[in-house]
Image (cartoon, rainbow, N blue to C red):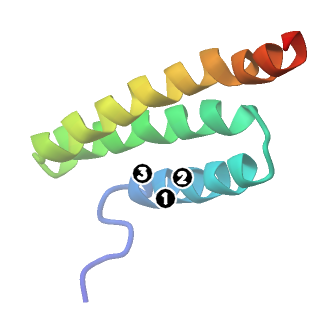
Amino acid sequence: MENIFAHYGIDWLAISLSLFAAYLLGNKRKVGFIVFALSNVFWIILGVFFMSSYGMALGNFAFLLLNIRGYIHWNKASFDNQAA
């Protein structure tokens, strides 16, 4: 069995943050986008520097942009509903 800390725990940190972010967003907490963005940064680091998986890094960069967009537009929907 391969060492479970072969990537210095970055993989464990990234997946833990991803799961926690999904939990936060499931409870309609805006901070979930920030936690997801942080996990995306760790996935990018893992993909580029440890696994040489540029596809994984590029995919997580796209997710990072989507999380930033989600954070910015979080209140827009509720603001539009209140205005109507």
Report crowding for label 2: few under 14, some 14 to 19, many 20 or more residues within 10 A (C-alpha).
Answer: many
User: What whole-number distance in Å separates the C-alpha atoms at marks 3 and 1?
Assistant: 9 Å
- The dot on residue 18 is 2
The three-letter amino acid code for the residue at tag 2 is Ser
User: What whole-number distance in Å separates the C-alpha atoms at marks 3 and 2?
Assistant: 12 Å
- The dot on residue 10 is 3
Question: Residue 11's quadrant in the figure?
Answer: bottom left
- The residue that mark 1 highlights is 15
Vertical arrangement, residue 62 with respect to residue 43, above or below: above
User: What whole-number distance in Å separates the C-alpha atoms at marks 2 and 1?
Assistant: 5 Å
Query: Does residue 21 appear left or right of residue 75 in this picture?
Result: left
- Seen at 12% across and 47% down, the residue is 53
Question: Residue 48's quadrant in the figure?
Answer: top left
Instruction: Decide which of 55, 44 is in the foreground and name it.
Output: 55
- Seen at 86% across and 10% down, the residue is 83
Q: Position of residue 7 (x, y in %)?
A: 31, 57
Query: Is label 2 in contact with label 1 (beta carbons under 8 Å)?
Result: yes
Q: State which mark lies toward you, 3 or 2.
A: 2
Q: Position of residue 15 (x, y in %)?
A: 48, 58
Is label 1 in a helix, a strand or a loop?
A: helix
